[in-house]
Image (tube, rainbow, N blue to C red):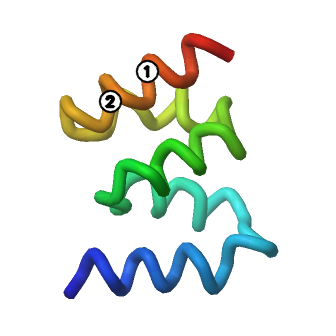
């Protein structure tokens, strides 16, 4: 249920996001596709928050952000 609420927040605020929301999404999103979309949209933020994410998500985002 929490995952769905975070995803809803992401989609509702995506067009007019701010840095606090982006940080929240990188900390709380659990959906790999949305994390990868976020890393593509905000690569610098993804690099900044990669060390705060669980190991699996960090590895996925690390591969994506190192390729940019």
19 lies above or below 47? below
Q: Position of residue 31 (x, y in %)?
A: 34, 58
The residue labelled by disc 2 is 58
The residue labelled by disc 1 is 62
User: Residue at position x 21%, y 38% from top?
Assistant: 54
Residue 18 in the figure: left or right of residue 2: right
- Badge 1, how many Cα within 10 Å: few under 14, some, many 20+? some
Q: Position of residue 10 (x, y in %)?
A: 55, 74
User: Residue at position x 36%, y 49% from top?
Assistant: 32
17 lies above or below 54? below
Q: Position of residue 59 (x, y in %)?
A: 31, 23
User: Residue at position x 54%, y 27% from top?
Assistant: 47
Residue 4 in the figure: left or right of residue 38: left
Q: Quadrant of residue 53?
A: top left
Give the secondary structure at mark 2.
helix
Pointers 2 and 1 in contact (C-beta within 8 Å): yes
Residue 50 is tagged as: none
């Amino acid at each position: 249920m929490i995952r769905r609420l975070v995803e809803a927040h992401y989609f509702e605020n995506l067009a007019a996001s701010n840095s606090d929301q982006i940080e929240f999404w990188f900390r709380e999103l659990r959906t790999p596709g949305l994390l990868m979309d976020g890393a593509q949209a905000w690569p610098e933020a993804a690099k900044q928050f990669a060390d705060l994410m669980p190991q699996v998500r960090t590895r996925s985002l690390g591969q994506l952000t190192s390729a940019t």
